[in-house]
Amino acid sequence: MRKLKEFIIEKLILICGLASIFFVVLIFLFLLKEGLAVFKTVSPFKFLFSRSWYPISEPPQLGILPLILGSLLITAGAAIISIPIGIGCAIYIAEIAPLKVKEVLKAGIELLAAIPSVVLGFIGMVTLVPLVRTMFHLPTGLTALSGSIMLAFMAMPTIVSIAEDALYSVPKTYKEGAFALGATHWQMIWRVMLPAASGGMLAAIMLGIGRVIGETMAVMMITGNAAVIPNSILIPVRTLTATIAAEMGEAVTGSEHYFALFAIGIVLFIISFAINVTADILLHKRQ
Amino acid sequence: MTQIKFNIKGLNIWFGSIYALRQISMDILANEILSVIGPSNSGKTTFLRMLNRLNDLSQNFRMNGTVMLMGRDIRGIDAELLRKRVGMVFALPLVLPLSIFDNTAYGLRMHGIKNMKILKNKIEESLREAHLWEEVKDRLDEEAFKLSGGQQQRLCIARTLAVEPEVILFDEPCSGLDPISTAKVEDTMVKLKQKYTVVLVTNNVKQAARVGDRTAFFLNGELIELDTTDKIFTVPKDKRTDDYIRGKFG
Amino acid sequence: MIKNPYRTQNIAFFFLFLATLLIVIPVGLIVVLIIQKGLPAINWQFLFSLPRQGMRAGGIFPAIIGTIYLVAGAIIFALPIGLLAAVYLSEYAKDNLLTRIIKLAIVNLSGVPSVVYGLFGLVLFVVFFKFGASIISGSLTLGIMILPVIITTSREALESVPYSFREVSLSLGASKWQTIRHIVLPNAIPGILTGTILGLGRVAGETAPILFTVAAFYLPQLPKSIFDQVMALPYHLYVISTQVPNVDEKMRYGTALVLLALVLFMNLVTVIIRYKFRKKKKW
């Protein structure tokens, strides 16, 4: 009797263990099921590379190039801002800050990670957007730049915490060896710690970027959502994620527009898959 | 004639590519204390953990040969039942994060005994056998972590006794204890052999000499010599045994 | 001229410190700003009455209730599955390809953009299972989204229970499941709790996954069953900040404050749990 009960429980545990695989596959299959339908009317090449996104004109024009470029522009901007600051902060926390300061800083970073993206979007709207507008004398502050700054900020917790972990896992003997040779603290960090932790650092950057590409609400609230090919960082742009969030509510189920939004979902899924697998490999190589 | 408890024939054990035990053949007699000595990495703990199949938990464990308990191959015995019959006391006093009472009752409860009266009797009996009862009888509900190291180790013995094993395996039970606690644990072991078979793995050659009826000397995974403790310590047949007990290596 | 290594060091450390300030100071400012501007909006009526005049007046009670329902629903779904998955990984999984794939799947699940979860919830729960836009669709979507958080933190908690406890339990003749049930799980509870509450905090703040699966734009009433739509705090904040003109700024800040307070409260609970149990830990 007890044996039977345990047999059932252990099978249940196995099933739950497999649940993650099941859900990943399920998500992908359902995205494919709905998204691939759009390619009956648009070729994949045209979908990815044609320059106009007018989903409700007749016939609809479904080219997501402006959206891809919008996402890329904002992501690149966010990366340029967040990588040096995030890595710098990680080094400061891991190596330099005294123990008590370290606790406070880590709590601050955790606090940032906990703030919902819609709240950050709202704060960006009321503070950052007017600031960008007056600073650059623009008709609107809802620009790619505002989005990049906000997203850089949102990527920080990911970058800082993973980079910090990478620094911690550098063997103590490396550090002691460098100090024994008379290196200053900074020389030790620059010549020993950073190279030794480079794999983890790279993973931190990639996962931070993954966070930026996937971010939806804040971006939708502060980038202005104009589906045009961006030629400057000071104009409104629209990202892949914001397009789905903004238009799915209005898209008629089963319409080309609806399918196209799912196809964007496939693109996002594949991007995040690639980023996460690569980062995971980087993190594993380290061990 | 003395009864044979364990009969071991041609036992080989590997962990991955490491050849841990080589061609071990020996008997363990009922109601004896068998001391197993040898330097570290000689395979003596692996040998001990074979007897209650704890090695099975290691992922890359492989073996061949046979180990019989009272004439039955232990691989044919349900592991849970085998471990009930062959109890084990570990190197460090590994009390569970439970009260003294619950620690002692743990094994019994896992075997389905829930009746408080039976549990209480059995626990008193086991704690008495482990010479701990007088020290803890008024504070059975306290966390076991609050006991001293020696008391904790005797609690571990009581916990093992409570499930009424036939054989008790001791894996360097005194390695973390001071001399007075060690003496108490040794005293307990000697008394236990009236009812149980005891296998004692120890790094302490003198301890083997003090409590063992017979002594087995392991080196690099091989059983070098097995004889009465007197003979091992006075007229060992193998030079390596002699060297080891004189402290020339290990 | 010979470069002075200590001067280089001072300059470098100054910039690192600056980078840190660039993150931490805005965080502080944001929190202060929300509290300062949101606090005047908070009163009994704001918290416990229905919205009126197209959300320009009244309270946010339905959104608070909606978020509580969603959080509860997500956790009822995700905790058992996540916990058992963690048990599988920590106690049963061997070091083989399958385990590797499971771990990769978890990493991926945690990386999928939240709006993609929204799409998935829409097709699977709203359309395929015909639940419609409802509490159950939203909860299940959010539940799948937080699975990785729960699995990862629970697994860490389970693995931090010393291996020797398991050996002792097994050596006394307990079965593997008995060992897990009586030794491993009880000692991992603080960590599991922490992970669960972190997951809850995340659920409470997410907007994109509930956009098409549950959230009602303006629904001044309370849900009657799990197949009803509800308002939710994060979506409500989005709506009154971007979709409805002429909403008093105080109401926006007030809503942001309530949401932030809810999320931070949960985080605070995890900190307290961690602190309390770290002190009690005996191994």
Image (spheres, rainbow, N blue to C red):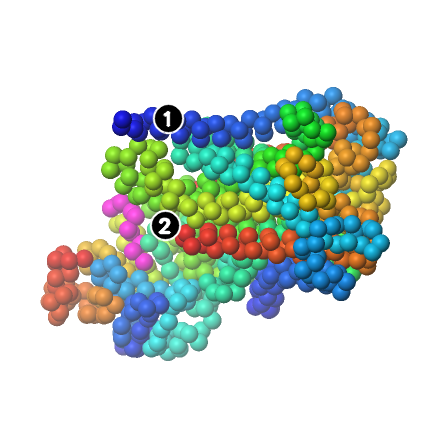
Q: Residues within 10 Å of mark 2 (few under 14, many from 20)?
A: many
Choose between A47 and B85: the one closer to the eye.
A47
Residue B112 rendering spot, x and y as whole percentages: 54, 61
Residue A43 visible in image: yes
What residue is shown at x 83% (from left), y 28% (from top)? C246
Confirm or deny contact between disc 1 and disc 2 (CB under 8 A): no
Is residue C3 toward the left or the right of residue A127 in the image? left
Question: How far apart are labels 1 and 2 at the CA level?
Answer: 51 Å
Q: Residues within 10 Å of mark 1 (few under 14, many from 20)?
A: few
Q: Which residue corresponds to mark 2?
A: B93
What residue is shown at x 39% (from left), y 62% (from top)? B87
Residue B111 rendering spot, x and y as whole percentages: 51, 62
Dot 2: chain letter: B
Name the element at disc 2: loop
Q: Are marks 1 and 2 on the same chain?
A: no
What residue is shown at x 62% (from left), y 41% (from top)? A74
Residue A240 visible in image: no
Dot 1: chain letter: C
Q: Which residue corresponds to mark 1?
A: C10
Name the element at disc 1: helix
Which amino acid, by three-letter code, is at mark 2?
Pro
- Image quadrant containing the N terminus of chain A: bottom right
What residue is shown at x 78% (from left), y 50% (from top)? A54
* Magenta-drawn stretch, dominant element (helix, strand or loop): loop
Seen in the picture, residue C101 relative to A234 is either above or below; the reply is: below
Magenta stretch: give its range: B171-180
Which amino acid, by three-letter code, is at mark 1?
Asn
Is residue B181 toward the left or the right of residue B127 in the image? left
